[in-house]
Image: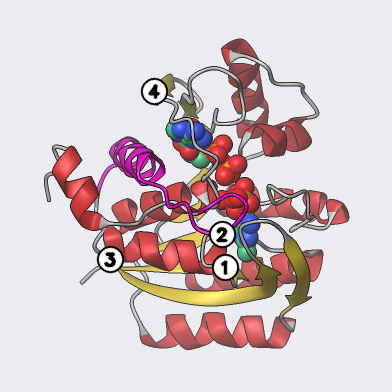
Amino acid sequence: MKTALTIAGSDSGGGAGIQADLKAFSANGVYGMSVITAVTAQNTVEVRSVQDIDTDIIRDQIEAVFDDIQVDAVKIGMLSKPETIEVVIEGLKKYKPSFIVLDPVMVSKGGHHLLQPEAVEKLKELLPLATVITPNIPEAEVLTGLTITNLDDMKKACEKIYELGVKTVLLKGGHLNSEPNDLFYDGQTFHLIEGKRFYTKNTHGTGCTLSAAIAANLAKGMSLLDAVQKAKCYISVAIEHSLDLGHGHGPTHHFYQLYKKELAFNE
Ligand SMILES: Nc1ncnc2c1ncn2[C@@H]1O[C@H](COP(=O)(O)OP(=O)(O)O)[C@@H](O)[C@H]1O
Ligand SMILES: Cc1ncc(COP(=O)(O)OP(=O)(O)O)c(N)n1
């Protein structure tokens, strides 16, 4: 069986972070593993508190997994602080996984900083190691200093992020008022990954889910563009059937049968 590893934070409410990633890995048919970088006390309404994990324990988790088990793809989420990013960079340079999907998580829906603002420069050091980076609009604005309000702005932002040394960019358009179209850029060609907006408040963990599904698809051997397009289908179905749990933004629905039923999905 193919495997994927998530290096990310824990969400006690189960909608985002490690929990969303492991659900997405399973639903997309790969064996999931985790390196926990931080524990958040979080639900569908808010992030109440965060405990960063000691960097020695993060290093130990990375080594324990890679020393024993074949890792076919890595997904990176919440990294919290510069010291954590440094340990993750060391681990990736040591073990050189074939595919790295970097979701540059910065701020939760409720406005809680999941990456210290002073860690953004350190995060940029991770970019050249990534196969693909998957920023949302606010994250792309932080990385580029641009204001992004339309497709032209998205193109400029992709080019600027690409210049930071990353191999490919998937800029997510979910935060714009238009249809949730994402833009994929490989340094030469733009591909519009079209979506249809579902009018629901239950979109907690959408970015985590999308990046984890891309990692799962890469682990299974898909080409990068195919992995992105199939993952976009997966997140769309997961949002369409999202769950009205809790009092805030409910989670997406990781249910393989829904995905299988609604997509021409060949495995
Ligand atoms: N309401 C929605 N309906 C359909 N797709 C959406 C919706 N909101 C976001 N998406 C899609 O979900 C994925 C995650 O995007 P986004 O919500 O922007 O990320 P993040 O969770 O990092 O803020 C993207 O493919 C985006 O286009
Ligand atoms: C532990 C943890 N990691 C990441 C996030 C952000 O997840 P995201 O998919 O961007 O979803 P929202 O925060 O926008 O709902 C998180 N909240 N917690």
Residue at screen point 77% across, 23% down: 146
Quarter placement of the N terminus: bottom left
Q: Which residue lies under the disc numbered 3?
A: 30
Mark 4 Cα within 10 Å, few/some/many (few <14, many 20+)?
A: some
> Is 36 situated left or right of 168 in this image?
right
Q: Are marks 2 and 3 in contact (CB under 8 Å)?
A: no
Rendering quadrant holding ligand 2: bottom right
Q: Which residue lies under the disc numbered 4?
A: 194
The tag on residue 246 is 2
Q: CA distance from mark 2 to mark 1?
A: 9 Å
Mark 1 Cα within 10 Å, few/some/many (few <14, many 20+)?
A: many
Q: Which mark sits nearer the N-terminus, 2 or 4?
A: 4
| Front tag of 4 and 3 | 4
Q: Amino acid at mark 3?
A: Val
Give the x, y percent position of residue 199: 48, 30
Q: CA distance from mark 3 to mark 1?
A: 23 Å
What is the secondary structure assignment of the residue under circle 2? loop
> Is 116 situated left or right of 180 in this image?
right
Q: CA distance from mark 4 to mark 3?
A: 25 Å
- 108 lies above or below 225: below
| Front tag of 2 and 1 | 2
Q: Which mark sits nearer the N-terminus, 3 or 1?
A: 1
Q: Amino acid at mark 1?
A: Gly
Q: Amino acid at mark 4?
A: Glu
| Front tag of 2 and 3 | 2
